[in-house]
Image (cartoon, grey):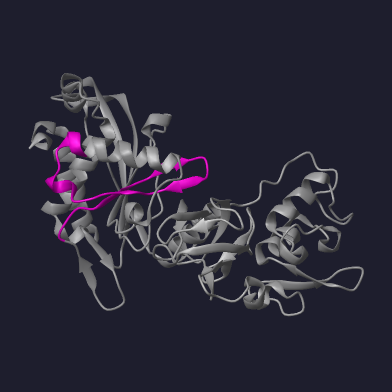
Amino acid sequence: MVYEFRLPQVGMGMQDGTVTAWLKSEGDAVVEGEPICEVESAKATIEIEAPVSGILSKILVEKDGFAEVQDVLALIEQEGGAPAEAAKPAAEDISAPAPTQIVRRAADGAARQVEPRAKRLAEKLGLDLETVIGSGPGGRVTEADVEKAAQRGDVSAGSENAGATFEDVPHSAMRRAIAARVTEAKKTIPHFYLTVHPEVDALIALRGRMGSGVTLTDFIIKAVAKALIAVPDVNVAWTEAAVRRFKHANIAVAIATTGGLVTPVVREVEAKSLEDISGDLRSLSERARASQLKPADYEGGQFTVSNLGMYGTSEFTAIINSPQAAILAVGAAEPRPVARNGNVEIATLMTCTLAVDHRAIDGAMAAKFLASFKSAIEQPEGLLQ
């Protein structure tokens, strides 16, 4: 029989993806459980395993092709089955396109298929799809085809892009997901903000004595976990039925990659040493920048830390990472004047701004959390326990 190899939903919220590589060619034998292709989803590049054993008889979504969850990526012919062509899905019949594709009529009257992303990108660029040569199966126009056409300058005369001195960089799946997520969060979550300025001279001195590669971010994550356990009414998420309170401190950490921002999770931080936190975060960061995160790496975060201090940013506010209820924005540690006993002295301060979902957390509780966090940062010996 011929098995339709479909794009699975790998992780919560995954809706579509782009095939970045086929690890097998047509005619190759595949074994159930072995990686067969790589797909870029909104958050990471994922290896997709063969669900059955057999022969990869037909690839339907080529490299750089777009597919939605449950679209057929390829056909696998299992032993004793009918020829692959007999089971070819309607998506490959140009007279009967799949629902995820848009049919356009070419100049010669033949029907063509256009991927939804290709259509949206063409509209944005002012590109006439009739001029785009499709490279997909059956002449299907892919997002990559539109990008190539735009690079060649095939933009309609009426477009504002004609003769422009700028470059449009097409959105990746990750960038689209980030845009949708932060827009929804800002529209639907009632944010409010609180700021503290902890002194970090003692913390910096302790870190220097440790000499074990532990970073300021590791200390911050540990201090956040300690504060979440001390003030459990901040370790929560809003749902329509209830405020969900969590038992552990699973902390997401914002990491910048070439493709965009990802937030892998360091789990049960309250029970980990600084060295363990440092090792976990280093591993997650390396895999994030290599697009090798698995869904288990970035799902289940309950609170996010975003540290831009290493870029010299003094202070900023961040957008809550839904469905979480809070995010801590951490600026650079800088020498600043402080008043002590009527005298002005210089101390190293760090500006930390907490963004809070007011549906789930009230101001007084958020203030208690920040006070606990500040105390932990200013008495860093307690973070070694």
46 and 207: which is toward the camera = 46
141 and 209: which is toward the camera = 141
Residue 303: percent from the left, percent from the top? 28, 54
Q: Looking at the picture, does residue 330 appear above or below residue 129? A: above
**Relative to 10, is 301 on the left or the right?**
left
| Image point (21%, 35%), residue name | 219
Residue 235: percent from the left, percent from the top? 21, 58
Residue 287: percent from the left, percent from the top? 39, 41
Q: Looking at the picture, does residue 202 appear above or below residue 184? A: above
| Image point (29%, 39%), residue name | 281
75 and 99: which is toward the camera = 75
Count the numbered circles shown: 0
First to last magenta residue range: 247-276
Q: In the displayed image of the protein, which residue is found farthest to the front?
A: 80
Q: In the displayed image of the protein, which residue is found farthest to the right?
A: 108
| Image point (77%, 63%), residue name | 139
Residue 273 belongs to magenta span: yes
Q: Quadrant of residue 245?
A: bottom left
| Image point (87%, 57%), residue name | 158
Residue 99: percent from the left, percent from the top? 64, 77
Q: Looking at the picture, does residue 379 appear above or below residue 137? A: above
Q: Is residue 307 visible?
A: no
Q: Is residue 120 visible?
A: yes
Name the quadrant of the C terminus: top left
Residue 211 belongs to magenta span: no
